[in-house]
Image (cartoon, rainbow, N blue to C red):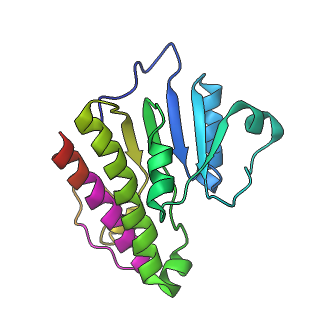
């Protein structure tokens, strides 16, 4: 959570996009730039930016390893109005192959990132709006469009790890209000 960006319209805001190299991340970065915002793009420590030259020159790229506390602290030390958290293990097949890794990256890594921002919130140092990307797979299957009040019931390691990330967000928000 957080108080949110300075304004929804007008002057741009500074947004940290984690997972900026991923499929969704690349589109989010472009959309934010097109809307006039300043983007700090976070990608894995060994990842070269996967974007065209114009985007690469326009955004500031930083390394982010959700499994490394120092890396997360360094990324969270920046000044941002908002954070769009897309980083994580996104493959259901990879999560099925290694459920512990899915939990470590998706739930644990998210908890680590949100805690870093939560600590800054408690000191009054920073309070960016945080948007956490999850998955519809956290809900029990239904034969109609899902709504947020549907029953939670993840049925795969990937879905369970993303539900863990959601719980980390809820806990951090409650603890740091």
> Taking 34 as reference, is 52 left or right?
right
Q: Main secondary structure of the magenta part?
A: helix
Q: Quadrant of residue 100?
A: bottom left
From the viewer's side, name the closer residue of 176 and 135. 176
User: Can you see residue 143?
Assistant: no
Q: Position of residue 123 (x, y in %)?
A: 25, 34
**Does 118 sit above or below residue 23?**
above
Region rendered in magenta: 152-170
* Residue farthest to the top, as pictured: 10
In this rendering, would 172 be left or right of 106? Answer: left
Specify the farthest residue to the bottom: 97
Residue plotted at (43% across, 53% down): 133
Q: Quadrant of residue 111?
A: bottom left
Q: Is residue 40 magenta?
A: no
Quadrant for the N terminus in the image: top left
Whole-percent x, y for residue 169 in the image: 29, 53
Most foreground residue, 70 or 5 = 70
- Image vertical order of residue 89 relative to residue 117, above or below: below
- Residue drawn at 54 percent across, 60 percent down: 65
In this picture, residue 162 sits left or right of residue 31: left
Which residue appears at 60% of the width and 42% of the height? 41
On screen, residue 130 above or below 164: above
Q: Position of residue 150 (x, y in %)?
A: 24, 61
Res 141 → quadrant? bottom left
Q: Residue furthest right?
A: 53
Residue 124 is situated, as x and y percent measured from the top left of the image, at 27, 30
Residue at image coords 79%, 34%: 54
Give the tally of numbered discs: 0
Q: Quadrant of the C terminus?
A: top left
**Is any part of residue 154 visible from this angle?**
yes
Q: Is residue 157 magenta?
A: yes
């Amino acid at each position: 959570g957080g108080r949110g960006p300075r304004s929804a319209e007008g002057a741009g805001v500074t947004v940290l996009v984690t997972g900026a190299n991923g499929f969704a991340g690349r589109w989010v970065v472009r959309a934010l730039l097109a809307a006039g915002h300043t983007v700090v793009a976070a990608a894995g420590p060994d990842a070269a930016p996967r974007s065209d030259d114009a985007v690469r020159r326009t955004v500031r790229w930083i390394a982010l390893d959700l499994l490394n506390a120092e890396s997360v602290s360094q990324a969270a030390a920046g000044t941002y109005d908002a954070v769009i958290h897309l980083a994580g293990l996104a493959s259901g097949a990879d999560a099925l192959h290694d459920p512990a890794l899915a939990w470590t990256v998706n739930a644990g890594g998210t908890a680590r990132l949100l805690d870093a921002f939560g600590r800054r919130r408690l000191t009054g140092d920073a309070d960016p709006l945080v948007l956490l990307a999850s998955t519809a797979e956290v809900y029990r299957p239904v034969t109609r469009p899902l709504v947020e009040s549907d029953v939670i019931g993840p049925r795969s390691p990937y879905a369970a790890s993303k539900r863990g990330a959601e719980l980390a967000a809820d806990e951090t928000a409650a603890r740091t209000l």
